[in-house]
Amino acid sequence: MPPMSASHDRYPYSPIAERPVYDWPGGKRLAVYIALNLEWFSFGEGLGAELAPGGPQPDVLNYAWRDYGNRVGVFRLAELFAELKLPVSLLVKHFEKCGNAWQLAPNIRGRVAFQKHNLIAGVPLGVFDVIFCRNVLIYFDEATKRDVLARLASQLAGDGYLVLGASETTRGLSDAFVPVADGCHGIFKRQLVVPKAVAAA
């Protein structure tokens, strides 16, 4: 007889004939788990995963699999499973179905506060990891833009991000922000100003 394979420490060996019998409720012997996997791909950053080698553009095969399937086919599948009375898990974190649309789950919506705020003279609301201020600065003169950016910088965490409109910038208006990367128009990272060392006399 060939020698037995070397054992490991992950779990003890047990012959299947000596293992206890595991049955599902009602004496059922088989359980089936069905999940619809929804994947997300960045626009303008390549084609993403390929199910199979694609042909010349437009790549109909992989486009249909990763884009059309997620946007249209997944809802048809969900409706089919519902008609067949087969429970299915939608692998979508933090969202839930609401009629024909999707909305944030209650545990996330409950953490959102809606209120009016004056960017020029309002009392600071706190310190945030990200601030969205899209297409607002374009309506201010240069002096007001500087003032607003200074206020936003004081309310942004040291490693936080500021999101402006695609045509808006902090360049020439504030030294507290730096662009994230080329191609990410309107997204800036908080820049910590490190005091220069004072030379000893």
Image: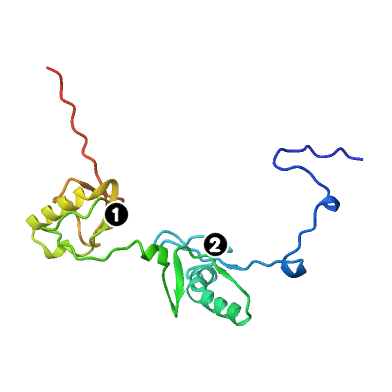
Which residue in the protein does label 1 denote?
130
Q: Residue 190: percent from the left, percent from the top?
A: 25, 47
Colour scheme employed for the rendering of this structure: rainbow
Per the image, label 1 sits on a secondary structure element best described as: strand
Q: Which mark is residue 166?
A: none
Say what amino acid the circle numbered 2 marks.
Glu
Residue at x 68%, y 67% (from the top left corner):
32
Q: Please tell me whether mark 2 or mark 1 is closer to you in this view.
A: 1
Q: Residue 150: percent from the left, percent from the top?
A: 15, 50
Give the left or right position of residue 103, taking residue 13 as reference.
left
Q: In the image as oriented, which residue stretches furthest toward the bottom?
A: 83
Q: In the image as oriented, which residue stretches furthest toward the front?
A: 26
Which residue in the protein does label 2 denote?
50
For the residue pair 188 and 128, the one nearer the viewer reads as: 128
Q: Earlier in the sequence, mark 2 or mark 1?
A: 2
Say what amino acid the circle numbered 1 marks.
Val
- Badges 2 and 1: C-beta atoms under 8 Å apart? no
Q: Residue 79: percent from the left, percent from the top?
A: 55, 80
Quadrant for the N terminus in the image: top right
Give the left or right position of residue 102, taking residue 55 as reference.
left
Density class for disc 2 (Cα within 10 Å; few <14, some 14-19, many ≥20) is few
For the residue pair 70 and 118, the one nearer the viewer reads as: 118
Residue at x 44%, y 64% (from the top left corner):
94
Report the Cα–Cα distance between label 2 and label 1: 33 Å
Per the image, label 2 sits on a secondary structure element best described as: loop
